[in-house]
Amino acid sequence: MTTINRQVAASLDDACVYDSDDDVNPPWDAFYSNALHDYAGKDGSNYREGCGMRFTNITIPQGAIIDSAYLTFTCRLAGSGTTVRTNIIGEDVDDAAQFSNLANYNGRSRTSAIVAWDGINAWVVNSEYVSPDIKTVIKEIIDRAGWASGNDLVLFWENDLSNTGADRIAWSYDGSSAKAPKLAITYHVGVAYTITVTEVLGMSESVGTKAAFKKTVSESLGMSESVAKPMHMYKTVSEILGMRDQVEIRKHKIPIGDLPDHVITGGAKHE
């Protein structure tokens, strides 16, 4: 497995928004790209809050398996109001752009994957706090047909029915580049392989040359260890060869064509 660590690295790579009415977000009512903080929840004046963060050069291959992913925030202003209810969502795009204005923020498509971050405990200034695992959000972005290693992605952290006065406020890039939000993703790449009939039967790699057996036919077909004893099968031929219809194997009779005499009990074939 491989872990990559990224941090918001430019002023336009994070932005905060808020909304003063009761509609569903987005759309949001106000946008700030140079605020000193990123936040989520609902403040004491009943304003709903959220933010977006862009992480660049995500060197993960398209379709990779995401083992875990976490956001880390560093507290800017202490907060202990309850109950905080927030969501972490991704931007559903191949290569995310920087934030520019309110319309740009509101117009971004969202992933269907959403991770709730609810009941957040009190925050202490300059302490770090880690989100729940957001691998499902990252996986949806990485699995896009147009994703390529080195692309950029955006994550949103936004209010979801928090109580009034229940928000959490973190440092943004403009507030402190060293304490800006961080993203850690652990992944691995799956290995695709194909098993050929020769591998199943224990034959050498090429049946076009010698078709030599590396194992006895009895071992390959799942027979008992000794061919001098009755040839009981502990697997059906259909299981071994991956056939759809089950081929029934009975004692001393293998209806898949003649086998060499030496693999038949007593050296005689039984019809």
Image (cartoon, rainbow, N blue to C red):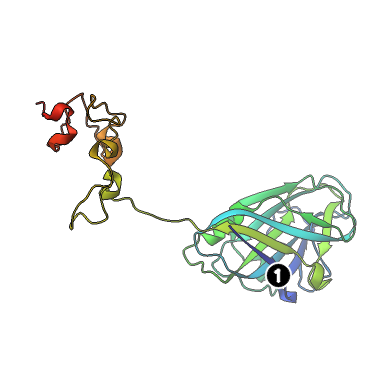
Q: Residue at x 89, y 53 (%)?
A: 79
* Residue that numbered label 1 is attached to: 102
Mark 1 element type? helix
The answer to whether 178 is drawn above or below residue 50 in the figure is below
Asked whether 44 or 33 is in front, the reply is 33
Dividing the picture into quarters, in which one does residue 264 lie? top left
- Extreme-left residue of the structure: 271
Mark 1 is on which residue type? Leu
Instruction: For label 1, count other residues whose C-alpha is less than 10 Å away and answer few (under 14), some (14-19) or many (20+).
Output: some
Residue 39 in the image, given as x and y percentages of width and height: 79, 60
Foreground: 234 or 152?
234
- Residue 3 horizontal side relative to residue 244, left or right: right
Q: Residue at x 69, y 62 (%)?
A: 183
**Residue 34 visible in rendering:** yes
Tell me: residue 96, above or below residue 158.
below
Position of the C terminus, as image quadrant, is top left
From the viewer's perspective, tell me whether residue 44 is left or right of residue 129.
right
Q: Left or right: where does residue 138 sit relative to residue 16?
A: left
Query: Is residue 27 at least partly visible in the picture?
Result: no
Q: Which residue is located at x 27 percent, y 55 percent?
A: 205
**254 versus 132 height, above or below:** above
